[in-house]
C-alpha cells in the first residue's frame, strides 16, 4: 500500500442525505495492482462511497481523483470510459437478455475476441456460467446473477473495479473461484480493485489493505492482521 501514485484517491468526501451525513470527511486511496477492502457494519456508508465514486450520488464536499484527474465534474459514463467499472450489491443483470449477451455487453470494444460465428468463444466464458449461456437473466438464481455481473465487469478490463459485496449470495464453493479469478485478473491486467464485503474469510484471503468504516468515516486501516485485532474495529461491530 502507498507505493507510487494511487489509481484512485478519495479526499475528505462528504455525502449528505438531507441533514444526515452518510459520508463524513472520508479519505482513502487504492494503488495499481492492489485489492483494497472496505468493511464495516450495515449502514456505515460503504455503498454510498461506491455511488459517490462512480458519480451516481453527488457529494457535498471533497475530491475524487483517478490517475491524477479530478472526477467530480464528470458523470458516470465518463468515469466508466476512464476505466472505472462497478458491480452492485443487488446484481444488475439484463433480465430479457441471455447470459451470453449480458457477458458480451461488458466488452470494452464490442466485437473484439469474438468467434467467427458471432458467439463468444468457449475459452473466455467462465466454467461456472457455461451451462447457463442460453438462459435469460430472469431465469438464473441470485448467486448466478452475481457471477454474471462480475464477469461482465471483468470483461471490460477495468482500470478500477468497484465491487459491492461480490460474494453475497454466492455459494461457498464459488467464492474461492471468485477470489482466484480476481487475484489472477489483478496480477495480469493490473486492475485496481476496491471491494466491499461482509465475508471475512473472503476478505482476509484477498485484500492487500483494508479500510474499516463506521458511521460514514474511516475508523481503522491496515492489513487484515492489524484491523482484525484493532479494539476500535471490534467495538464498532459489537457496539453497533
Ligand atoms: P452500507 O452500504 O455500509 O450498508 P449505505 O451506504 O447503503 O451503507 O447507507 C449508509 C447510510 O445512508 C444508511 O443509514 C442509509 O440508510 C443511508 N442512505 C443510503 N442511501 C440513502 C438515500 N438515497 N437517501 C437517504 N439515506 C440514504
Ligand atoms: Mg451496502
Image: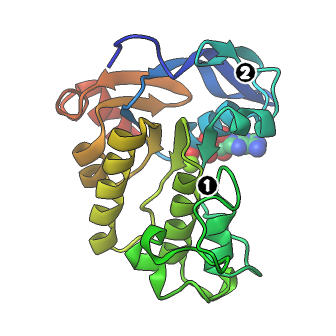
Q: CA distance from mark 1 to mark 2?
A: 20 Å
Residue at the front extreme of this rendering? 116
Q: Is mark 2 within 8 Å of ligand 1?
A: no
* Residue 39 seen: no
Q: Point out which mark residue 88 bears.
A: 1
The residue singled out by tag 2 in the image is: 71
Q: In the rendered image, which quarter is residue 227 located in?
A: top left
Secondary structure found at label 1: loop
Is 222 rendered above or below residue 147?
above
Q: x, y (%) of residue 62?
A: 68, 13
Residue pictured at 39% horizontal, 51% vertical: 198
Which mark is in front, 1 or 2? 2
* Residue 202 seen: yes
Q: Nearer the viewer, residue 234 or 208?
A: 208
Q: x, y (%) of residue 179?
A: 31, 55
Image coloring type = rainbow
Mark 1 or 2, nearer chain start? 2
Q: x, y (%) of residue 74?
A: 81, 26
Q: Nearer the viewer, residue 185 or 17?
A: 185
Amino acid at each position: 500500500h502507498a507505493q507510487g501514485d494511487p489509481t484512485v484517491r478519495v479526499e475528505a468526501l462528504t455525502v449528505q442525505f438531507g441533514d444526515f451525513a452518510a459520508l463524513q470527511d472520508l479519505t482513502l486511496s487504492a494503488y495499481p495492482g492492489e485489492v483494497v477492502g472496505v468493511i464495516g457494519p450495515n449502514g456505515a456508508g460503504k455503498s454510498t462511497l461506491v455511488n459517490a465514486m462512480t458519480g451516481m450520488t453527488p457529494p457535498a464536499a471533497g475530491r475524487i481523483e483517478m490517475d491524477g484527474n479530478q472526477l467530480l465534474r464528470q458523470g458516470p459514463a465518463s468515469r466508466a470510459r476512464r476505466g472505472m467499472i462497478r458491480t452492485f450489491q443487488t446484481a444488475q443483470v439484463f433480465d430479457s437478455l441471455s447470459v451470453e449477451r449480458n457477458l458480451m455487453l461488458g466488452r470494452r470494444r464490442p466485437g473484439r475476441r469474438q468467434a467467427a460465428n458471432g458467439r463468444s468463444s468457449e475459452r473466455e466464458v467462465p466454467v461456472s456460467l457455461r451451462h447457463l449461456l442460453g438462459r435469460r437473466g430472469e431465469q438464473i438464481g441470485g448467486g448466478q446473477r452475481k457471477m454474471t455481473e462480475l464477469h461482465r465487469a471483468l470483461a471490460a478490463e477495468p482500470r478500477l473495479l468497484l465491487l459491492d459485496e461480490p460474494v453475497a449470495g454466492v455459494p461457498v464453493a464459488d467464492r474461492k473461484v471468485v477470489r482466484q479469478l480476481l487475484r489472477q485478473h489483478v496480477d495480469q491486467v493490473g486492475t485496481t480493485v476496491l471491494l466491499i464485503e461482509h465475508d471475512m474469510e473472503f476478505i482476509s484471503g484477498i485484500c492487500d489493505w483494508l479500510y474499516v468504516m463506521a458511521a460514514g468515516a474511516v475508523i481503522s486501516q491496515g492489513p487484515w492482521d492489524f484491523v482484525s485485532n484493532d479494539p476500535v474495529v471490534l467495538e464498532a461491530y459489537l457496539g453497533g
